[in-house]
Amino acid sequence: MKIGVVAYQGSFEEHALSVKRVFDKIGKGEVIPVKRAKDLDVDGIIIPGGESTTIGQVALRLGLLDPLKEKISQGIPVLGTCAGAIMLSKEVTDAKVGKKSQPLIGVMDASVIRNYYGRQRESFEATVDLEEIEGGKERFVFIRAPAISKVWGKARALATLNDVIVMAQEDQILTTTFHPELSGTTSIHEYFLRMVKR
Ligand code: GLN
């Protein structure tokens, strides 16, 4: 199993570490950084947090955006965390600025509101109930996180926090508004890698 992590900014190392910890449980594999289209020979892709506008612009400039979109449309499993979740959603607004267009992958029937909880200092830790993926209650960090304000079509909410969707799935596309790679637990990565294995 080969997992690619988009590696322009954000926590590549932490995602790679979480994936490797799951490999120890469910089988062998490798993790590679993805920067250009030639790096897309993988079985699953993780798009980490960071700044979605930057990630989108760099992906566009380096020619990754369209091939990535194509690969996901063909059915490759993808996990988008925080900025990654923004990149995957079809509709994006910013809590402060309102509608502003930015390069997106835009494959999931979901609306997100960027910076929903406020600025950097409003980052927080909260307990999320993972019972929809047969997990327990776990602590996660939200860093200038978006909110998933709406899902439709085949997309569905997998977890909420105070009635706001924080985790969603549409077929093989999984998104979280929090950072599972910074939590010290691996339930989200394990759930994702089981999707890849199937
Ligand atoms: N606020 C960032 C954005 O809008 C996302 C933050 C994150 O990925 N931790 O892209």
Image: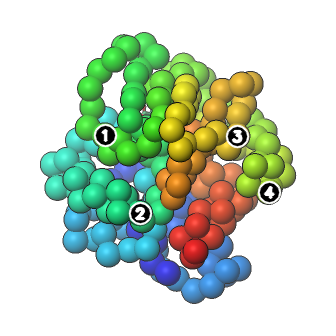
Residue holding disc 3:
159
Disc 2 marks a residue whose amino acid type is Gly
* Mark 2, secondary structure of its residue: loop
C-alpha separation, residue under disc 3 versus residue under disc 2: 23 Å
C-alpha separation, residue under disc 2 versus residue under disc 1: 18 Å
C-alpha separation, residue under disc 2 versus residue under disc 4: 24 Å
Residue 113 in percent (x, y) is at 48, 24
Residue holding disc 2:
75
Please report whichever mark, 4 or 1, sits nearer to the chain's N-terminal start: 1
Q: Does the residue at mark 3 contact the one at mark 2 (Cβ under 8 Å)?
A: no
Q: Does the residue at mark 2 contact the one at mark 1 (Cβ under 8 Å)?
A: no
Q: Quadrant of ligand 1?
A: top left
Please report whichever mark, 2 or 4, sits nearer to the chain's N-terminal start: 2
> Which residue sits at x=32%, y=45%?
105
What colour-coding does the image apply? rainbow
Residue holding disc 1:
104
Residue holding disc 4:
134
Residue 95 in percent (x, y) is at 46, 16
Please report whichever mark, 3 or 2, sits nearer to the chain's N-terminal start: 2
* Mark 3, secondary structure of its residue: strand
**Does residue 83 appear left or right of residue 178 in this picture?**
left
Please report whichever mark, 2 or 1, sits nearer to the chain's N-terminal start: 2
Disc 1 marks a residue whose amino acid type is Leu
Residue 176 in percent (x, y) is at 58, 44
**The one of 189 and 51 positioned closer to us in this rendering:** 189
Q: Nearer the viewer, mark 2 or mark 1?
A: 2
- Can residue 57 be seen by looking at this rendering? yes
**The one of 48 and 192 positioned closer to us in this rendering:** 192
Which quadrant of the figure has residue 5?
bottom left
> Which residue sits at x=80%, y=49%?
131
